């Protein structure tokens, strides 16, 4: 739905109507370029030409995206029966929604699972409305930053343990975002190498010690891990 | 209000919001929220490996702790 498409009609108006119907978008949401405006020719017989237009979904301004995302989150939270305010802004190419409430942690949940659920649902609803949208981050009481800090600490601890014991050390299962922070933190550290293992909700990060004098990635202990190509992007 | 919560989310996710039906069966301690959607929208409210359904259940249980109750979301085929 992101790419542009062409439509035909007897008149430009008719072509636009057709485009709206087929793409299931409102006229305001479309970027319309007229290729040829139709002509009915002489008496509608000689020289009739169809109107051709090219349309693509219009990109929404970041400020409008924030407004929409904020509205969706507010609609969800207003059913909660708790006084709550949502503040929206654009931060590092992301839409940042901050839930301000009584500070009970109600919207954070155990290990941020309520925040993650809200974030997932809001992203899904907004993506349905506008196909090209900045990623939305839902936060409350600065939880995301605090969580990041504790994950960085955890990563360093796992790294130390792996180096000291010369044995692979596994983290507890965690989601993709949390694993990414572990991978990125240990990428800079020498003497260890990281890899994700396990399936679905049980996926965890394993930290391998790297033998001395061989600090390149992939030079880890154990013959099984040597066969694996160094995976940089996808796994992190 | 638990009903409104699920109703809003479900209507915003599906292609046929007019076919979304939510009913609440209230018990003493537990409420059962029943969600019915059009057949072709079933996948939208369940999501890949049940991710959307799980997210809705998580939000629902957060909302229900506020009123000291337990809530269960049933998606009815």
Image: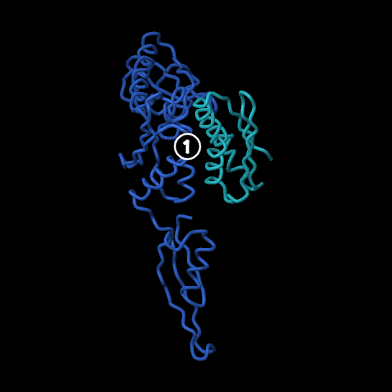
Chain colours: A blue, B cyan
Frontmost residue, A80 versus A36: A80
- Residue A38's spot in the image, x, y percent? 46, 79
- Residue A114's spot in the image, x, y percent? 47, 29
Q: Is residue A30 above or below residue A207?
A: below
The quarter of the picture where the C terminus of chain A appears is top left
Q: Residue furthest front?
A: B28
Residue A187 figure quarter: top left
Q: Which residue is mark 1?
A: A120
- Residue A126's spot in the image, x, y percent? 45, 46
Q: Residue furthest bottom?
A: A43
Q: Please give the name of the residue rendered at 55% of the width and 38% of the height, measured from the top-left corner.
A: B6
Residue A54 figure quarter: bottom left
Chain bearing tag 1 is: A
Q: Is residue A28 above or below residue A160?
A: below
- Residue A119's spot in the image, x, y percent? 44, 36
Q: Secondary structure at mark 1?
A: helix
Give the mark count. 1
Q: Residues within 10 Å of mark 1 (few under 14, many from 20)?
A: some
Q: Please give the name of the residue rendered at 54% of the width and 31% of the height, measured from the top-left corner.
A: B60
Q: Is residue A206 above or below residue B42?
A: above
Q: Residue furthest top?
A: A165
Frontmost residue, A114 versus A227: A114
Q: Is residue A184 above or below residue A64?
A: above
């Amino acid at each position: 739905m992101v790419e542009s498409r062409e439509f035909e009609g007897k008149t430009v108006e008719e072509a636009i109507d057709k485009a709206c119907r087929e793409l299931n978008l409102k006229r305001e949401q479309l970027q319309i370029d007229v290729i040829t405006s139709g002509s009915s020719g002489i008496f509608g017989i000689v020289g009739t030409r169809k109107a051709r237009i090219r349309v693509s979904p219009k990109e929404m301004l970041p400020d409008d995206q924030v407004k929409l995302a904020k509205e969706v989150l507010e609609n969800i939270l207003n059913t909660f029966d708790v006084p709550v305010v949502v503040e929206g802004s654009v931060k590092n190419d992301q839409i940042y929604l901050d839930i301000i409430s009584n500070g009970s942690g109600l919207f954070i949940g155990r290990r941020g699972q309520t925040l993650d659920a809200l974030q997932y649902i809001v992203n899904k609803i907004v993506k349905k409305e506008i196909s090209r949208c900045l990623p939305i981050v839902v936060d409350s009481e600065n939880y995301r930053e605090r969580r990041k800090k504790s994950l960085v600490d955890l990563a360093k601890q796992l790294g130390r343990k792996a180096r000291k014991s010369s044995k692979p050390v596994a983290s507890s299962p965690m989601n993709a975002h949390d694993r990414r922070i572990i991978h990125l933190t240990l990428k800079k550290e020498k003497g260890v190498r990281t890899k994700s293992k396990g399936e679905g909700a049980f996926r965890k990060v394993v930290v391998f010690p790297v033998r001395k004098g061989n600090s390149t990635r992939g030079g880890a202990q154990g013959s099984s891990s040597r066969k694996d190509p160094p995976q940089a992007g996808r796994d992190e | 209000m638990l009903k409104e919560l699920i109703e809003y989310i479900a209507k915003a996710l599906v292609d046929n919001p007019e076919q979304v039906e939510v009913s609440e069966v209230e018990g003493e301690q537990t409420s059962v929220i029943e969600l019915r959607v059009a057949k072709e929208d079933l996948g939208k409210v369940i999501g890949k490996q049940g991710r959307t359904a799980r997210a809705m259940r998580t939000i629902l249980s957060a909302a229900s702790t506020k009123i000291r109750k337990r809530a269960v979301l049933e998606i009815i085929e």
